[in-house]
Image (spheres, rainbow, N blue to C red):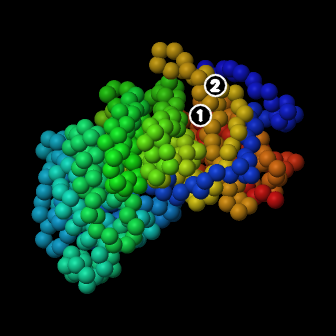
Amino acid sequence: MERRSFVMALAGLGMAQSGADALVEASPSEAGPEISKHLYGHFIEHLGTVIHDGVWVGPDSKIPNAGGIRKQFIDDMKRISAPNLRWPGGCFADGYHWRDGIGRKRPRTYNYWQHSMPAGLDHTETNQFGIHEFMRACRLIGAEPYVAANVGSGSPREFHDWVSYCNAPAGTVSLADERAANGDKEPFGVSWWGVGNESWGCGGDMKPAEYAALYRRFVTQFPVYPPKPRLVATGPRGHSRDMDLGWTTGFFEAMREHRSPVNGFSLHYYTDFRNGRGRAPAFDAAGWYAVIREGMRTADVIAKHWEVMSRFDPRHRTKLVVDEWGVWYSPGDEIAPRAILSQPLTLRDALHTAVTFDAFQRHADKVAMACVAQTVNCIHSLFLADGGKWVRTPVYSVFEMYRPHMGARSVPLRIRADEIAVPADGGSARMAGLSGSASMIGKRLTVTLTNPSLDVGKKARVRVAGGAIAEGRGRVLTHENMQARNSFERPNEVQLAPVRVDLREGDAEVVIPRQAVVALELRIS
Ligand code: AHR
């Protein structure tokens, strides 16, 4: 169902002679901002089996662990240099009282997600995984902690005490001594603090001005211990069919006359295929393209909210923090009944991940951090875990492919390729036939390209404006079956493979198979 819709004037770019389907030109001399490593961040919540079983198996488990943290989780997160970890929620955060998760005797408490559990399954929170265990996980991985505080049912005092407990040097306030007595003499050094979560919904059902008033009370008198705090206010939902610019406008309007710092403004952007719109493992061509096209809309969502923010904050002291994103399908395909919101991720979700990262990178000046929702056993996961079983999803491979972009400078990429016409609900739609992003560090240029077509591969000629490519290698993620996925039984069904890169007259040539992501590492002479 693919159709050439227009032909670019490519002769001047040498495309006609090259016989390529696409010309991709990177311009390192126009390099933009550094791509923060934090764009490839993570989110784990006390929800279903994300923490209990996914991350935390307990020190007495037969499953290999480090102080109770699943070892496989640590190893795989280290391999992709996971830069941050957001915790404890999500909706759970606004019902969480941090004191329940410290010390030897921990209470069993109500968990927000209890209402979603199938009848007969207990989801009482045991509180075995608290701030010390979370910090252990962060240290073992090498990730920075991002802690979401309880605004919905907590108080400024509870928040400030938590900050002191985490960051005050031992021997100063009593809370620091208590932390030391609980096993951590050194301060945790938490810099990223989320002030509530989805305060328009599960975090308190507030209007933007109500939340803004509370936000100010929560951040005023914030205890000043190192490191410098980065305070993230609750932002809008930004679901694919409703961007909720009203929340962004309302919040910044209510903050206009005030001095409280807002370093980050959270944005949750789910490609929302719930309510019968789609199942994770089974879909047709229209479903394939719909998900990838929604992923591409991430750029638009960022741009629209940024535009509103510019009106109130022209110097852009506040950056966006996309601390929840991913594809969310209808229920029914969970890996186990208690693993609510878990879903099997396919090649389609890997391509969605790639186009989402491209959007973040192209907006590297606006987005300070992004966290996938959620890293294990929930929505857009990199891992699925069930007792002793563990598998990396195709999404994980894309995190691996994009890792070289971390800390490099974003480089404009001009892609000349035909648009494609694709099947869509009740008709057809058009979309980019090839998309991607690039970055440069030293002499290394990384180019990541996505070919969404279910029908044809594309030969791409990659060129560097004002330079020549001296060496190149690449990796590809694809599968002949668009619904392919990794399972506990077949963990390597979808995996990375090398792709051939030919050097021609200072350019690189690569054939990008249909339904594929390619990552090229090129050395510029
Ligand atoms: O990621 C699952 C849930 O989605 C989070 O708890 C909440 O913040 C969002 O609605």
Residue that lies at the very extreme toward the bottom in this rendered image: 171
Question: Residue 243 at x, y = what percent?
Answer: 40, 32
Q: Is residue 141 above or below residue 22?
A: below
Using residue 355 as the reference point, say whether residue 501 is left or right of it. right
- Name the residue rendered at 52%, 42% in the picture: 356
Using residue 478 as the reference point, say whether residue 388 is left or right of it. left
Image label count: 2
Residue that lies at the very extreme toward the front in this rendered image: 257
Residue under label 2: 420
Return the residue nearer the eye: 360 or 326.
360
Asked whether the residues under the numbered discs 1 and 2 touch, taking CB atoms below 8 Å apart as contact, a structural biologist would say yes
- Name the residue rendered at 31%, 42% in the picture: 254
- Ligand 1 closer than 8 Å to the CB at disc 2? no
Disc on res. 345: none
Q: Looking at the image, tell me whether mark 1 or mark 2 is earlier in sequence order.
A: 2
Return the residue nearer the eye: 370 or 257.
257
- Name the residue rendered at 30%, 35% in the picture: 332
Categorize mark 2 by other alpha carbons within 10 Å: few (<14), some (14-19), many (20+): many
Query: Looking at the figure, which quarter contains the C terminus?
Result: bottom right
Residue type for callout 2 = Ile
The secondary structure type at the circle numbered 2 is strand
Q: In this orientation, does residue 216 appear?
A: yes
Q: In this orientation, does residue 87 appear?
A: no
Query: Looking at the figure, which quarter contains the N terminus?
Result: top right
- Name the residue rendered at 39%, 60% in the picture: 230
Disc on res. 452: 1
Residue type for callout 1 = Pro
Residue that lies at the very extreme toward the top in this rendered image: 426
Question: Residue 241 at x, y = what percent?
Answer: 40, 28
Question: Residue 358 at x, y = what percent?
Answer: 57, 44
